[in-house]
Image (cartoon, rainbow, N blue to C red):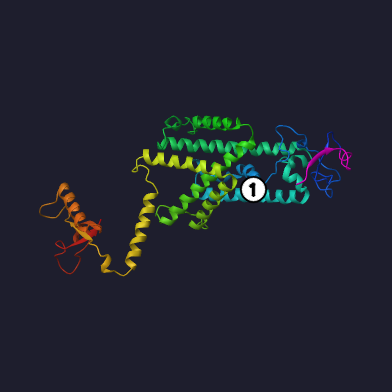
Amino acid sequence: GGSLDGGSGGGGGSGGGGSGEWCFVNGSGRYGLRHTALPSPVLSGQCDPSPHSTLGELCDLPRVFSFVFPAVVGMMEGANLSGDLRDPASSIPAGTVGAVSTAFLCYLMLIFGQAGSVDRGALQYDLSAMQHLCVREGFVVLGVATACLSTALGSMFGSARIMQAIARDRIFPLSFFAHGAAHGDEPRRAIVLSYTVAQAGLLIGGIDAVAPVLTNFFLVTYTLTNLAAALLALCGLPNFRPVWRLYSWQTSLLGAALTAGSMFFLNPLFALLTLALALALGVYISATVPSGRWPSISQAVAFLTARSCLLTLDAQPADPKYWRPSLLLLVPPSQAAGPQPTAGGASLLLRLAHRLSGSGLVVGGRTLPLAAIGGGRGGGGGGGDASCAQAA
């Protein structure tokens, strides 16, 4: 609740060297480093009121989170470039965990270092406190420029690879971006598009305005990725076999809940707009992409739901009050002697069985000779005339 005042009194005007006015916080006469660390306060260019200054705007948790989060989104870089890796199944988990753990340790050191040496007022009101507190401001500028260049290049090339893959899958009408370079199949057209979109975002007016929007789209990406992984694990699909030993569907579901909750914590309006856009893209894909070419995970979810309901029904005692007819329709094998039902006749049989069962179940199947499945071995003949029913 204190105010920021400029001036040379209060014991701060003669300290430290350099030109300009000292910035005092809460009347303490100190700004920046604690007087126990250095004897002089630190100059701050944000003490001068200007239209572009953040003077007086409290750097609360949602604001700082939205600024910092785009700098720690490298966990998807390996997945974005999985097509260029020799062994992505082992390289992506090890590389991602190693990189994220190293970055997390560096951030913890930075957080505790600033908390132990920087005044609370500087951390709350000065977005450039670290630069102002460094021995040479150029070190921070160089570090930020290097980090920004690395993150920008990773995001730009990763998004270009994804754009190229989407265009080749013909999910959206983006065939122009499906072509790659003659050497290395580099997605040059998609790179130009990614660069153009990034530059257009910068025209909004500043990083402070762009960062919350980027954070929302990163969070919705992680939400859908975690949710898809959780659904694949819950459905028990045989072709989904994660090699990461510590993986479980609970962690994916928890990650989806945390990222979705973070979206609404930062900005509920942005979160609703982002989810609406993602829903619109999903509806477009469902309406335009043939299900045979790109089956939806809803098929696996529906199968899991039906199986769970049938198991629950089987465990309950049968009651005549809720009885309903269920029919088993058997069709002779195609190689059996005698007349075979035509396609139209089989359709009529199915329709008749459906009418007879009403709201019950109709299970159709084709009989197979025991000889065809290895039956009739030993114990005499006659196996060729016997048959067994296989539900279809």
Q: Quadrant of the C terminus?
A: bottom left
* 327 in relation to 280, above or below: below
Counting the numbered discs, the total is 1
Q: Which percent across, then down, holds residue 354?
A: 21, 54
Quadrant position of residue 178: top left
Q: Is residue 336 visible?
A: yes
Q: Is residue 389 magenta?
A: no
Q: Residue at (25%, 57%) from the top-left corner?
A: 359
Q: Main secondary structure of the magenta part?
A: loop
* 176 in relation to 230, above or below: above
* 233 in relation to 1, above or below: below
Q: Which percent across, then down, holds residue 233?
A: 44, 55
Residue type (three-letter) at the residue carrying disc 1? Ala
Q: Is residue 109 left or right of residue 283?
A: right
**Element under disc 1:** helix
Q: Which percent across, then down, holds residue 374?
A: 22, 61
Q: Which percent across, then down, holds residue 231?
A: 44, 53
* Residue hosting label 1: 103
Q: Is residue 197 left or right of residue 8?
A: left
- In magenta, the rendered stretch is 1-16
Q: Residue at (37%, 43%) from the top-left corner?
A: 294
